[in-house]
């Protein structure tokens, strides 16, 4: 697949998550709540997590912002649901590395839709948009 076709596919995945967010909403009972914002561009997220026995049982978000921040939140909630907290934090570190343009071992961990965000590394001003939800997740699970 050529670079242009791959770039187009990635844009489509990002826009799909933006227009049809997964796990939108909040968890009402027995949840961890984290509110964060990115004052640089106005993105804000309200993240709720249900963590039981060291595992992220559920994750939902609400908020407003650019397509990258909202798509990243949608992808993040999908990616961490069902993971052990340690694995969720490990995935978060891999995501940060990708945002910095570093290579990752795609044999060791399948990133699924998250791969669509790797182009953000070319736009340093947008990295904070992509990482906002991840920072909220880290803050939440570490407060547990």
Image (cartoon, grey):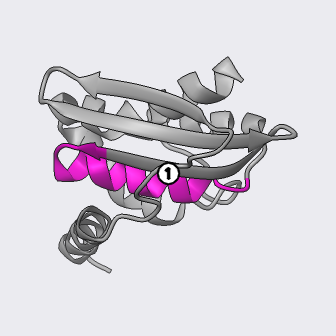
Question: Residue 100, located in which quarter of the rendered image?
Answer: top left
**In the rendered view, does 109 fall on the left or right side of 94?**
right
Given residues 63 and 2, the one toward you in this image is 63
Position of 4 relative to 135 (above/below): below
Q: Position of residue 55 (x, y in %)?
A: 79, 44
Q: Which residues are magenta?
A: 63-82
**In the rendered view, does 137 fall on the left or right side of 9?**
right
In percent of the image, x 32 and y 40: which residue is there? 130
Q: Position of residue 39 (x, y in %)?
A: 17, 20
Count neighbours of disc 1 (C-alpha within 10 A) and say few if under 14, some if 14 to 19, many if 20 or more.
many
What secondary structure is marked by label 1? strand
In percent of the image, x 26 and y 33: which residue is there? 44
Position of 15 relative to 69 (above/below): below
Q: Position of residue 113 (x, y in %)?
A: 45, 65
Residue 59 on the magenta segment: no
**In the rendered view, does 40 fall on the left or right side of 74?**
left
Q: Is residue 100 visible?
A: no
Q: Position of residue 33 (x, y in %)?
A: 52, 31
Q: Is residue 45 visible?
A: yes
**In the rendered view, does 125 fall on the left or right side of 86?**
left
Residue 80 on the magenta segment: yes
User: To which residue does mark 1 refer?
Assistant: 60
In percent of the image, x 27 and y 75: which residue is there? 9
In percent of the image, x 72 and y 24: which residue is there? 144
């Amino acid at each position: 697949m050529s670079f242009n076709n791959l770039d187009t596919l990635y844009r489509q995945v990002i826009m799909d998550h933006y227009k049809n967010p997964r796990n939108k909403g909040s968890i009402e009972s027995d949840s961890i709540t984290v509110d964060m914002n990115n004052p640089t561009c106005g993105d804000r997220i309200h993240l709720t997590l249900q963590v039981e026995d060291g595992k992220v049982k559920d994750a939902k978000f609400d908020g407003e912002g650019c397509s990258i921040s909202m798509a990243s939140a949608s992808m993040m909630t999908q990616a961490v649901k069902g993971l052990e907290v340690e694995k969720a934090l490990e995935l978060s570190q891999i995501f940060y590395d990708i945002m910095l343009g570093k290579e990752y071992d795609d044999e060791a961990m399948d990133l699924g839709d998250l791969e669509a965000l790797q182009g953000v590394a070319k736009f340093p001003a947008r990295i904070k948009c992509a990482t906002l939800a991840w920072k909220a997740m880290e803050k939440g699970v570490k407060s547990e």
